[in-house]
C-alpha cells in the first residue's frame, strides 16, 4: 500500500505472458517502463520551426536477484527456437497498481519482446543479479 500518498514498489504487481506461458520472475527487485517517441520537426517558409512527436512504443527492464533458473530456461528456449527455425511470438505484460486511495489501475503492454541483458555475475558470497529488457508496441489502460 502507498505510504503518505507516495507510490512505492510494493504497489505494483506484474504478470509477463510469453508464447511459452506465464513467466514468473522470482526475486524481482526493479521494474521500469518508458515511452519511446519519434521526433517530428519542420521549418515553415517564414522560418518558424514546428515540432511534434509520434508515440513509438515502450522500452523497459526487469531487474532480479537470481533465485531460480526461470530466466535462464526462458532464454535457452528462445535460443533453441530461433536456431530451430521456429517463429517466436510477442507477448504481453500486465501491470496492476494499487493507488493511494485504494483503487486499482491496470495496464497492458502489447507486442512485448523480451531480451536477456545480463545473465549474472557469479562470485563468492555475492548474490547473482540478472536483467531482462523489453520493448512493447503499446500501453493500454485496462481498468
Image (cartoon, rainbow, N blue to C red):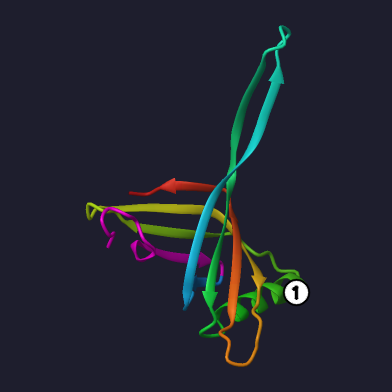
Horizontal and vertical percent position of residue 51: 63, 24
Residue positioned 54% across, 50% down in the render: 34
Q: Is residue 24 visible?
A: no
Q: For residue 63, what is the image quadrant?
A: bottom right
* Residue 75 position (above or below residue 40): below
Q: Which residue is mark 1?
A: 84
Q: Is residue 22 visible?
A: yes
Residue positioned 61% across, 31% down in the render: 53
Question: In the figure, is residue 56 to the left or right of 80?
Answer: left
Horizontal and vertical percent position of residue 68: 53, 85
Residue positioned 67% across, 13% down in the render: 48
Question: In the figure, is residue 132 to the left or right of 45?
Answer: left
Which span of residues is magenta-colored? 1-19
Residue at the top extreme? 46
Horizontal and vertical percent position of residue 41: 69, 25
Q: Secondary structure at mark 1?
A: loop
Residue positioned 44% across, 53% down in the render: 108
Horizontal and vertical percent position of residue 96: 36, 58
Q: Nearer the viewer, residue 118 or 16?
A: 118
Amino acid at each position: 500500500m502507498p505510504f503518505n500518498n507516495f507510490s512505492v514498489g510494493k504497489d505494483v504487481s506484474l504478470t509477463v505472458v510469453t508464447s511459452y506461458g506465464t513467466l514468473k520472475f522470482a526475486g524481482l527487485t526493479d521494474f521500469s517502463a518508458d515511452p519511446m517517441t519519434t521526433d517530428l520537426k519542420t521549418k515553415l517558409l517564414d522560418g518558424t520551426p514546428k515540432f511534434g512527436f509520434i508515440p513509438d512504443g515502450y522500452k523497459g527492464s526487469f531487474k532480479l536477484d537470481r533465485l531460480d533458473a526461470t530466466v535462464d530456461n526462458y532464454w535457452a528456449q528462445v535460443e533453441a527456437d530461433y536456431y530451430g527455425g521456429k517463429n517466436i511470438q510477442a507477448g504481453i505484460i500486465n501491470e496492476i497498481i494499487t493507488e493511494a486511495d485504494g483503487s486499482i489501475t491496470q495496464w497492458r503492454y502489447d507486442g512485448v519482446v523480451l531480451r536477456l541483458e545480463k545473465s549474472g555475475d557469479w562470485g563468492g558470497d555475492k548474490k547473482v543479479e540478472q536483467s531482462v529488457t523489453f520493448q512493447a508496441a503499446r500501453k493500454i489502460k485496462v481498468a
